[in-house]
Amino acid sequence: MYDVAEVLGRLDDIRSWQEDLYRHLHAHPELSRQEHATAALVARDLRERGYEVLEHVGGTGVVGVLENGPGRTVLVRADMDALPVREATGLDYASTVTAVDATGATVPVMHACGHDVHVSCLLSAARLLAAARSAWSGTFVALFQPDEELVGGAQAMIDDGLAAAVPRPDVALAQHVLPLPAGTVWTRPGPVLSSADTVRVTLTGRGAHGSMPQDAVDPVVLAAAVVLRLQTLVSRETSPHDFACLTVGRLAAGSAANIIPELAELEISVRTYEAEVRRRLLDGLERVVTAECRASDAPTPPRFEYSAHCRATVNDPRVTAIVAEAFGAHFGAAASELERQTASEDFAVIADGLGAPYTYWGLGGIDPGLYGRASVARRLTTDVPVLHSPHFAPVIRPTLATGTEAIVVATLACLRGG
Ligand SMILES: [Zn+2]
Ligand SMILES: [Zn+2]
């Protein structure tokens, strides 16, 4: 029972299907909340393999449930959406797709975050598990989530009644392809991805002719002071032992050189691992902005709008130990400990919403030769394209096989219960 070799024995049989599937998904990316064709393809394949399939969960979400005798329940999640990025990989299966985004603009679309890898690997693992039912017992849930990039899809699936619609998982699992050597897998107990908050700040000044600053409250100068002072929240108010990242990613004001405008707008991203550090940063942000407005004698207090809160991803130590041990046994030296990542994810919303302890691991996707040369030359940051880059191009071999093996190995270990 729980025979990894028996389940993976069929991997060679599906390899060409799997690689064609990946190239098809890569060439046909869909924006967040528009994953209609991807979802339909996934649902059809799961149904053909004997899964009970739920569609349109939280928009375009798809869940396949395979009950296979008594035992535990393991859920594995893959995200399906792509990004508004113009692909520049030069691959013969590169995307040339454009789509209309939520604002009505036509944008290029690319799987620049590797979610096509995630879908291909999970659908492949779902096939293998369905084809080798005598090798395991329990319930396998394959969940395909929409809208990860705008961090809305996980919450949408929970809000749409996911918990009542699927068996309660004992464990939830997810993986993400990363700019690390292909063929490797990476686990980490505890915090692995940061929380993220987006704060929009509106500063109100008093407009005037550019030659008459004495009659104005200049929101451009005010915004400049705010941007610099906010950096001291990390450098002077956060312990060097704690992780915190504060980025003013958007700063907008004014329309012409000779006009002092009325307003300035800032959009700020705040990332942490610890709830207490997050609280202090957000409180500090309001304090600094409010004080700078008073220092400038602004006529109106600043306005703060909070959106897109994404909780930290904190891997359960026990589940992570089970998966790490199974990876060690299967992959040997190709299984290592992952460094904490500063990016954010909404997978934890699904796991928490279903009451399941979880672990989220990394999957290498970069040509090992390229990675090795860049590493020796200390040029990793310049020579290895990262996630969301128009050059991000995971290699098909062995990435897809490794990602599929990782799901099967972790799933069987968690079904067995360690
Ligand atoms: Zn992404
Ligand atoms: Zn991603």
Image: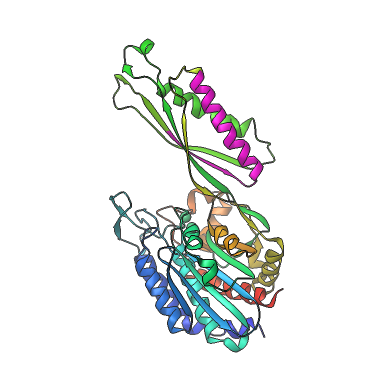
From the top left corner, tell me how far across and down residue 10 is, in percent: 53, 85
Q: Which residues are magenta?
A: 266-294
| Direction bottom: furthest residue | 134
Looking at the image, can residue 180 be seen?
A: no
Residue, x 44% and y 61% (percent of image)? 393
Residue 136 figure quarter: bottom right
Up-down relation of residue 175 to residue 298 (above or below): below
Residue 19 figure quarter: bottom left
Say whether residue 95 is left or right of residue 122: left
Q: Nearer the viewer, residue 409 or 212?
A: 212
Taking the magenta stretch, the answer to whether it contains residue 117 is no
From the top left corner, tell me how far across and down residue 43 is, in percent: 42, 75
Up-down relation of residue 233 to residue 272 (above or below): above
Taking the magenta stretch, the answer to whether it contains residue 289 is yes
From the top left corner, tell me how far across and down residue 65 is, in percent: 52, 77
Q: Nearer the viewer, residue 119 or 85?
A: 119
Looking at the image, can residue 299 be seen?
A: yes
Q: Quadrant of the C terminus?
A: bottom right
Q: Nearer the viewer, residue 291 or 20?
A: 291
Residue, x 42% and y 79% (percent of image)? 45
